Amino acid sequence: MSTAAPLAPSPRAQFGRTSCALLDEREDLAVVWAEISGQYLEAGARAHPDRVINVGIREQLLVSLGAGLALNGVRPIMHTFAPFLVERAFEQIKLDFAHQGVGGVLVSAGGSFDKASSGRTHQGPADVALAATVPGMTVHAPGTAAEVDATIRAAVAGDGLHYVRTSELTQATRIPTDGAMHVLHEGRGPGRRSAPAGGPLTLLALGPVRDAALAAARELDATLLTTTSVVPLDGQALRAHAGGEVVVIEPWLEGTSVAAVAAELDDAPRRFLGIGTSHQELRRYGTPAEHVTAHGLDPDGLIRRIRAWSRSS
Amino acid sequence: MTSRTVTRRPVTRARITALMSRLAGDESHTAAATSTLDVLHVLYGRILRVTPTSIDDPDRDRFYLSKGHGPMAYYAVLAAHGFFPEEHLDTFGAFESVLGLHPDHLLVPGVEISSGSLGHGLPLAVGAAHALRIRDSSARVIVLVGDAELDEGSCAEAIEYAAAAKLENLTLVVVDNISSSYTVHGRIEQRLRANGWRADRVDGRDQRLLEEALARRVPGTPNAVVAQVEKKSAQVENKSEAA
């Protein structure tokens, strides 16, 4: 890409760097923000004061103002923490973007529990499920700063409606952000005889959980598929690789993508297991790593739960 | 859309009310529709720089009907000015109709935003005003809300912000038919002024005063016009009145 700015180690900081670079590159782009992450937008605000718009602590306005820009030929990026962007301003996303028939790029920070010590109010585990209900919405969950950069650039380049969910759970395994499903591990073991469609146990890792899923796939000799594109899913690759037992692992509300995965895999009877954050509030502070473990999203937790489920067939 | 009506009759208030009678009435919304009639008549007749042939012009003036409830006067005014065929009015609310009880801008030529859920139009208009500023356009944005619509918190967000951002290309029209459950007389313009707006209350039936207030653009600050009309329950349309 044309910017020489180095990648930031933090996906959230990368959102800022990429946005500022894009403001330099195209005059019809604006970044709307709501007091959150201003420290990453200073260069853009200095260079383009008319196109870096801070609305204060006003999330409904954040989204609607962006839609007003889009209705009038300016491509908007809108940013704040996930629960404030998607949950608090949900009707603005549903009506002011989808119903008005315009596009924009919503970029959240914080993920499910980056702000573990801040408690429930700053955690957004239900954002993907909610965003997926919006007609025409593309949902991305990049796992590295480089993936955040590529995802935002591609989303801004089009005219569609996108939700880019960034999280500081940076993954060591990097994949292309091409919307495709990528095979990170080939399971060699034969499928369980009782599994309706046969084939190896298949894990599908969505979002920044692929490192843990890879460790689990090696231990279980399972096939591991992963992608940064959560909505829509690459159904063709799913059908090509999925066995009779499919585990959908996502570091947000458990079960969020299971129905969509099952709809793509309607060619044979299969068993599905969803693993994600629990529906019940954890009501704990601490670190993101402690929340990963508490929700069973670490390698040991995944292996334990998948073994118990697979044996239960 | 306009080729079929090359010579149109002059758009008078009587003409608009005649067209409104072609819309099958929804009783709960009839009074609300009538409350906006004079404002809409003045806007499309004397203020807005937009015609059926300029609805895609990036520099057209924008009118956002935020209060999507009771769109009969709006539809009638648009039809009278040739934005869509008058025959559409006869289909109001039907399954195949483009004219619903709340307007859809993807269906109706000349309608800038879809509305119905209250509290969306003003924040959208703030975005529109920003976009015009970014693009260095001289066009203006005029958004119409109802007095009770200002109950919505999203309006508070937009009112405070629009003045802070000095959106001088933005005009807010509040049609006040005293329909908010917790009305405090005079609060609307006081609230707007306290936030840095120019705000004036005028007789919402006096077309000369409306024109004067709506034509005004104040350097460095958004402009608001509170159009006082009859209390919602007391509205009676006088069909003999003509402009």
Image (spheres, rainbow, N blue to C red):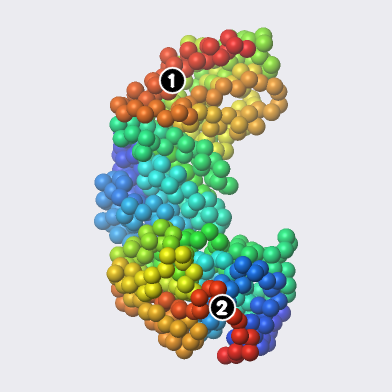
Residue B207 position within the rendered picture, expressed as x and y whole percent measured from the top left = 49, 87
Give the label on residue A296, or none: 1
Q: Amino acid at mark 2?
A: Gln
Which chain is indicated by disc 2?
A: B
Q: Quadrant of residue A243?
A: top right
Q: Residue at x 34, y 24 (%)?
A: A289
Residue A2 position within the rendered picture, expressed as x and y whole percent measured from the top left = 37, 46
- Say if B136 sits above or below A58 in the image: below
Q: Residue at x 57, y 19 (%)?
A: A202
Q: Quadrant of the N terminus of chain B?
A: bottom right
Which chain is indicated by disc 1?
A: A
Q: Residue at x 37, y 29 (%)?
A: A283
Which residue lies under the disc numbered 2? B235
Judged from the image, the secondary structure of the residue bearing numbered disc 1 is loop
Residue A240 position within the rendered picture, expressed as x and y whole percent measured from the top left = 64, 25
- Near-viewer residue (B37 or B115): B37
Judge left or right: residue B197 versus residue A227: left
- Say if B49 sits above or below A301 in the image: below
Mark 1 packing: few (<14 Cα in 10 Å), some, or many (20+)? many
Judge left or right: residue A187 versus residue A68: right
Q: Quadrant of the C terminus of chain B?
A: bottom right
Q: Residue at x 52, y 35 (%)?
A: A230
